[in-house]
Amino acid sequence: MSKMEMNRVSPIRILVFIAALLAASSSSSSSADDSEGTFADMFEMSCPDDHFKTSEDGQIWHLSLDKDAGCGFQTKERYRFGWFSMKLKLVGGDSAGVVTAYYMCTENGAGPERDELDFEFLGNRSGQPYLIQTNVYKNGTGNREMRHMLWFDPTKDFHTYSILWNSHRIVFYVDRVPIRVYMNSDKPNNFFPNEKPMYLFSSIWNADDWATRGGLEKTNWTKAPFVSSYKDFSVDACEWEDPYPKCVSTTTENWWDQYEAWHQSESQKMDYAWVQRNLVIYDYCKDTERFPTLPWECSLSPWD
């Protein structure tokens, strides 16, 4: 991965950006309805019991990592296309080496033929900014990383991280702001995952061999346990049902698979352009040292 310098964002730009967000939100259409039910209704846990806790009302979920174990969960259902959203509050303080992952995958495990859509939050030393890494896998092949800074401290409060997935494009959102647009082609290809249903997962785990400064910064276990928190899981998607799922082919019955969801609105283009100018610190499509011949999907415009 090539080395990229992080440009500081001026307070004036941030204020302008916030104003644009408020204006955009006032004119946007209503969001998907929050899913009903308890954690146990929607998810299966994968960690020791003492690494998972909930708030008294059961609406906030806390995953912890220590030297012995991490923690994770996954949806009980699989989906093909839709809108997936969750509010997260990330590990505060010295979180170097710690990765909080929020992703979709076709299987439980890193199988050789898996499709996957990743949000990964890369911890850092105290006072340094969190980095958010996104990636897309098709039939086990990834290497499509982008890394962004955030315009807020994700450890101070909950923020919303969402994925829009249809047959035309995949969009990664932070607080309804599109930070990455990954386009499909109208020709058969090996880069756009659109055939297999996916579970939604989240986990917290130790990745100090690569996560912070390429593995130079190791996890400080004296700061453990490291805790990430979740709430307000929302899904509006096609639930996969064997053997004849209703989402076997694309349909325009749902808002997430209609014209407006296939293209960016003018306000979304403004937000997306601001993010590209100010917050992107790595884009595999611009890494000619790593990819002398850029992958096919890099030629597809996210502005269409």
Image: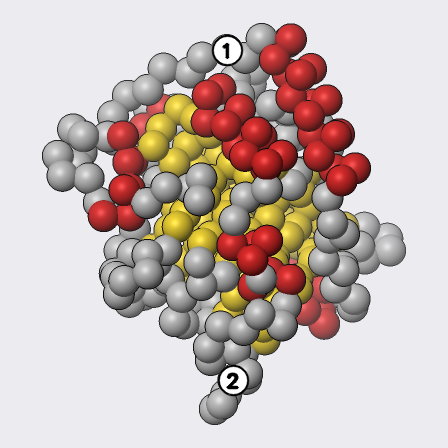
* Residue 103, horizontal then vertical, whole percent: 50, 53
* Nearer-the-camera pick, 132 or 126: 132
Which labelled disc corresponds to residue 21? none
- The quadrant where residue 298 appears: top left
| Residue that appears at 81% across and 57% down | 58
* Residue 99, horizontal then vertical, whole percent: 48, 40
* Residue 93, horizontal then vertical, whole percent: 60, 24
| Residue that appears at 37% across and 41% down | 301
Can the viewer see residue 71?
no
* Nearer-the-camera pick, 68 or 227: 227
Q: Which residue is mark 1?
A: 8
Q: Nearer the observer, disc 2 or disc 1?
A: 2
Q: Which residue is mark 2?
A: 245
* Nearer-the-camera pick, 145 or 194: 194
Where does the C terminus fall, quadrant-wise? top left
Q: Is residue 195 left or right of residue 299?
A: right
Can the viewer see residue 117?
yes
Please, which residue is most extreme toward the right here?
A: 57
Disc 2 from disc 1: Cα separation: 48 Å
